[in-house]
Amino acid sequence: MALVSLKSIRVCSAGTPASRQVLLALSRSLRSVGGQRKPPNPSAVAMRELCSRDKTSSLEVMSDIMASGALQRISEVEVDADGLKNPEEVLENEVFKALCFQFEFEASKLSNAGLLNALQALIKLRIDPESTLMASLLSESEERLATRQLAVEQLCSLAESLLELEGPSCATLGQIVNHIQEEDTENWTPREMTMVYKMLQATVREGEQYHDLLNRMNSATLAIADQLSPNFTSIILNSLVVLQQTQAVSLVIALCKHSVKHVPYFTDDELVNVLDAFLCFGHREQSFTDALETHVPKSISTMHPETVSKVMQYCCQKTILSKPIFDAVAECFISVADRFTTSQIAECIVPFGTLNYLPPSASSLFRKLETVLHTRFSQFQPHTLLNLLHSCVLIQRYPVNFLPKIFSPYFLQHLQAQPPGLDRFVASQLTRLFLTVTLECPFYEGPKLLPKYQVKAFLTPHCSLDFHLLKRVKAGLLYLLKKRIYFASEVSTPYFYIVDIEIKLDEEGFVLPAAQCEEVHRRIALCVDGRNRFCINSRNLLGEEAIKQRHLQLLGYKVVQVPFFEIESLNTSRKMAEYLHKKIFPRTYGLGC
């Protein structure tokens, strides 16, 4: 970051026409606004007065807040992401120099607001912190801090300036937080509360959590949650995430509920903050999802890719299959895929596989994805790429053109070298890719996955077994088959899958003891699918369970699905047995029922 040195500020007559036009535009905007009977712009007023008065006169002849407002307006006009646009034109302008001269030599006469606003503006303009101007303003600010002349909002403004100049290690920041701790949080306005949260988020270091202050703030914010603007709601939720306020459950829930009405009005960055809070704190709000379903399809053409990918990440983690959102994201990706980074591409596509959904534009979507992979393959991080391709096979989109690279020793070495390395979850993804290409792509003749990279059993965190439901099904089977020896539960197979319940039949269709290995003509796999194997509030199986049942069928099993929504009302073993009889043995009669 380039710093401009203003070691000695003095008034001079120099100043380029271009920079003077930038500065005097504020004065012209004042006259334009005044003609419309609108409140005057303080920046424009300051510039007009400065242009008409002796540049070295005391600040008493005009409002110092107007003067600092002029500096702020200059910083807004002249500074972009790359810094000061025209340093010489601005810093050598006589109006700007007059402002700086007065702020430097009359700092003690400034109001708190004028002092701190000027400090912030000059920092934004990249004025050298070692200059006499900055030294004067900083010294005066610290003096007023020491004598407790600054209100809460002003303390936060000073902290923001110090963070810009020195970072979170600045010793003065601790003094500011200590002063704030002595304030009564119950009397703070929403703006003050938001500023303190934002300041703590930036200043609190590891081991300095200020638990008492944060607890008081959380309680006070709960009382004013419904008064918060979209911006304040977003900032506070983001601060709660960064400050790890997991104990503030009531506040988080209140803010998440309050955010529903703000969904159409959040900026992209604000919406990302809110979604991060939902993800971090594990909260789910149906009305928020409904609001997203209305907002996203209408606004997606103007959304930043990071916002789009965050919406999909939210849906994926919450297992929310929102067809309006997914369909809109698919169309967006087809149109502007080049705007997305590789990680954003994965975050947008992976949910389709995880939640087992193909949009109406699936053909175009995956053609576009294949094109992107061909052109940007080397840009993907190994784990991101594996996660992306694994999600494709869940919904029967086979990346056979890229598998030779995935199974190559070179790629596997890179995969192992980057966190989390080749842990069991990653090895499960590799093994499922290998099994899929073996079972569903017999034409594939490329490299195979070596046995040392394969797992013995898949890790399926999203589709774990509902043991309460399993117990009820086993009770029904016992009633049906009379003896426990005729079925086995949680059976490991040579094909990496674990079967919830397995029943063996001989050639004539009679049930064999589960331990018998000879004369087995047919194996029946009962998939006891609890709620966690489906998308939330849906009967749509998750991708990992869908591919498991598909593969078991290809491996010769008769797959019998026992979903929770079909057996929830079966409250006796007899009713369960009758249900299982119809599902497993639809053509036989009298098997113990």
Image (spheres, rainbow, N blue to C red):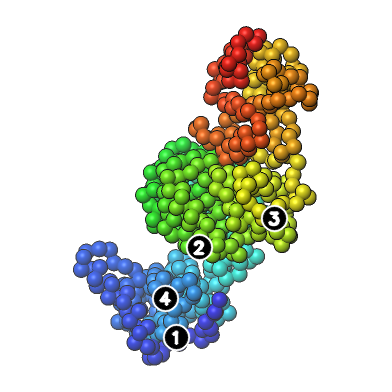
Q: How packed is label 1: few (under 14 Cα within 10 Å), some, or many (20 or more)?
A: few
Residue 190 numbered mark, or none = none
Which residue is tagged 2? 157
Name the residue type under label 4.
Answer: Glu
Kindly report which numbered mark, 2 or 4, lies closer to the viewer in this rendering.
4
Kindly report which numbered mark, 1 or 3, lies closer to the viewer in this rendering.
3
> Earlier along the polypeptide chain: callout 2 or callout 4?
4
Residue 78 numbered mark, or none = 4
Which residue is tagged 3? 447
> Earlier along the polypeptide chain: callout 1 or callout 4?
4
Report which quarter residue 55 is drawn in: bottom left
Of residues 240 and 536, the one nearer the viewer is 536
Determine whether, in the image, residue 230 is placed left or right of residue 563. Answer: left
> Earlier along the polypeptide chain: callout 1 or callout 3?
1
Of residues 34 and 289, the one nearer the viewer is 289
Name the residue type under label 1.
Answer: Glu
